Image: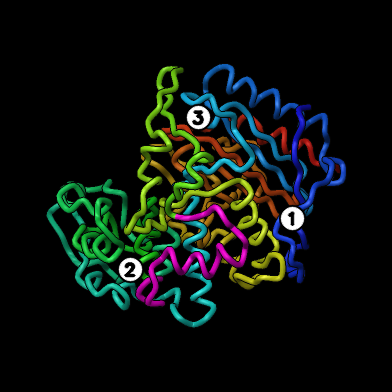
Amino acid sequence: MKNFIVLIALGTAGISLAVTAKELPLVTPAKAGLSEAKLAEIDRFMERQVSDQKQAGSIVMVSHGGKIGFFQSYGLMDREAQKPMAKDTIFRIYSMSKAITTAGALHLYEAGKIGLDDEVSKYIPGFAKITVAITNGLRPPLRPVTIRDLMLHISGLTYGEGPRALKESFARLKPMESTNLAEMVEKLAQVPLAFDPESDWSYAVGIDVLGRVIEVATGKNLDDFLAKTIFQPLDMKDTSFCVPPEKLGRFAANYSRTNGTLNLIDAPANSKFARQVTLFSGGGGLVSTARDYMRFLSMIEQGGSLDGHRILNPKTVKLMSNNLLPDKAFPIYFGKEKRYGTGFGLGFAVCTEVTSWDPTAHVGEFGWDGAASTHYWISPADKLIVLTLEQIRPYQWDTERGIKKTIYDAIRK
C-alpha cells in the first residue's frame, strides 16, 4: 500500500470530550479496526481511475470506530499545472454545502429562533403569495411551505424543472444569478411551485431559501453565521464561500468528462470561487477540504459535538439521519432515476432498505454528494464514515460504486 495519513476522530457517539487539539492524531489501519490488505484495493482502484483518465485526482478518507484509518490522495489537483493532489487541497463541494446549512438552521431551531413547522412566509413575506403550476394555469398551494418542507425537499421548489409556467418563470427571473440571498428568494417567491408541499419530492433550491431564513432570523449574513456557529467551533479553517488569494495554490481545477476525455471547465485562478461573493448559496456555494469536512461529519457521528464543542443535540441529529419523508414523497428521484430504498431526513439521504439502486449499501447509512462528484456517507451501525473528493462534472458514480463494498469488507469483525 502507498504511504498514507490516518487521523483519529476523538470521542464516541453522543459524548463530548473537552480537548483543545485541533489536528486529529494518526493511527495504523489495524488500530482503526480496518484491514490493510483490503484498503490496498482502494489504492489500486483509484490509481486505475487516474491512469484511465476517468478523473484527474482525488482523495479518499475512511473513519471506523471514531478513528480515521485511511487518508490517501491520488493523481493531480491541477493537470495543466501538473500539481499533485495534496491532503489539504481545497475542493468545490457544491451540494455538500446543504447539510452544513441545514445543521446551522437546526442550531437555531434548538435555540427557539425558528420552528420546523413555521411558514416560510413568516421570514420571507413574498412566499405568502406563491402559487402552484397546474395544467390549466396557476392556483394557491393547498397549504403553506414550511421550514421542514425546505429541509426535506418536499416544498415544491425546484432548480427550474417542472411544468411550463414554472420553467418560464425560472428562466425569466434567473434567481440563481441574483446578487444576494434576499434578491434570490424574492424572485423564487414569484416562481410557481411544481407541486403542493408534501405531495412529492424534488431536489431543490429550498436550502438556499433556508439560508435566507437564517439571515432574517439572526440579522447576519449566512457566511458570518456559519463561520461563528459551525466553522470556528469545529476548526473548519478552510471552509468558506470563496478561496482567498493566499490559498489559491491549494485550490483544485474542475473538469468535465465526455467520451472518456477530461476537459478543464474551471481553472483555479479564474474560478468564481476565487472571487469575493455577495450571494451566499447555502445549497451549493461552499469550498472545503477533506480535513474540514471530516470534522463536520465526525461531529454528526458523535451526536452533535466535537472536541468539546456542541453544535447540535443528539435528538436533532437523529432528525437529520432518519427518513422523515411522507409515503407519497418516497422514494427520492432525479428525472427518471428513482433511488429505491432511499429516503430523506433533515439534511441527509437515508438508506431504508437495500435495493438494486445501491446493492452494497447498509440500512441506516446516510449521506449525500456534490455536483463535482464529491461524496460522503455515515453508517452508524458500522461506526463508519467515508469521504471521497474529486472534481468531475457531471456527477460520476465511479468512486462510490467502485470502493463501497471494499470499505465495508475492510471492517475487521
Question: Of helix, strand and loop, which one carries label 3?
Answer: strand
Residue 304, percent across and down?
64, 67
Residue at the (21%, 60%) spot, across then down: 187
Residue at the (58%, 22%) spot, across then down: 50
- Can you identify the residue that label 2 sits on? 145
Q: Which of the 4 image quadrants contains residue 268?
A: top left
Residue 75, percent across and down?
60, 26
Q: Kindly identify the amino acid type of the residue bearing the numbered disc 2.
A: Val
Residue 220 within the segment the image draws in magenta: yes
- Can you identify the residue that label 3 sits on? 78
- Mark 3–mark 2 Cα distance, whole angstroms, equals 43 Å
Q: Which residues are magenta?
A: 214-240
Give the position of the C terminus as an image quadrant: top right
Q: Is residue 214 above or below residue 255?
A: below
Q: Kindly identify the amino acid type of the residue bearing the numbered disc 1.
A: Ala
Q: Nearer the viewer, residue 365 or 249?
A: 249
Question: Of helix, strand and loop, which one carries label 2?
Answer: loop
| Disc nearest the viewer among 1 and 3 | 3
Give the position of the N terminus as an image quadrant: top right
Q: Nearer the viewer, residue 5 or 216?
A: 5
The 10 Å Cα crowd at callout 2, few under 14, some 14 to 19, many 20 or more, is: many
Left or right: 135 with respect to 151?
Answer: left
Q: Is residue 13 above or below residue 361?
A: below
